[in-house]
Amino acid sequence: MPRLRVDRDTSEAEIVAAIHNLFAASHVIDAELASGRLSRSQRHTRADARDNLHDEIERLTNIVRYRRSRVPA
């Protein structure tokens, strides 16, 4: 899965939009898994993809948290 390239010029809004899109993709995968129409192999592939999405969501969330912690109050 491609990762969002984040540098100093990447805005928080762009990162948050990416997080929302990843959550939407995760929900699609959850619906596929709940449908009961996937083969065992497909279920494992989708579950791995969902795990990768959640890892990327966590990475991006940590970047946003770090940036917010660096902003003077």
Image (cartoon, helix red, strand yellow):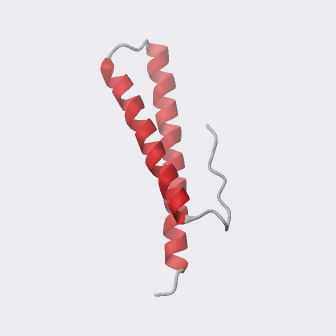
Residue 33 position, x and y percent, is 37, 24
Q: Residue furthest bottom?
A: 73
Q: Kindly identify the residue that appears in the image at 50 percent across and 41 percent down.
A: 53
Which one is in front, 47 or 67? Answer: 67
What residue do we see at 53% from left, 64% from top?
12
Q: Is residue 33 left or right of residue 9?
A: left
Q: Which one is nearer the viewer's eye here, 13 or 54?
A: 13
Total number of numbered discs in the rendering: 0
Query: What is the quadrant of residue 36 in the picture?
Result: top left
x and y percent of residue 34 in the render?
A: 31, 24
Q: Position of residue 69 (x, y in %)?
A: 50, 77
- 6 versus 65 height, above or below: above
Question: Which residue appears at 49% of the width and 74% of the height?
Answer: 68
Q: Residue 60 at what x, y percent from top left? A: 53, 56
Say if 59 sits above or below 11 in the image: above
Relative vertical location of residue 22 with respect to residue 7 in this rendering, above or below: above
Q: At 47% across and 35% down in the image, what residue appears?
A: 50
User: Residue 13 vs residue 27: left or right?
Assistant: right
Q: Is residue 59 above or below residue 32?
A: below
Q: Quadrant of the N terminus?
A: top right
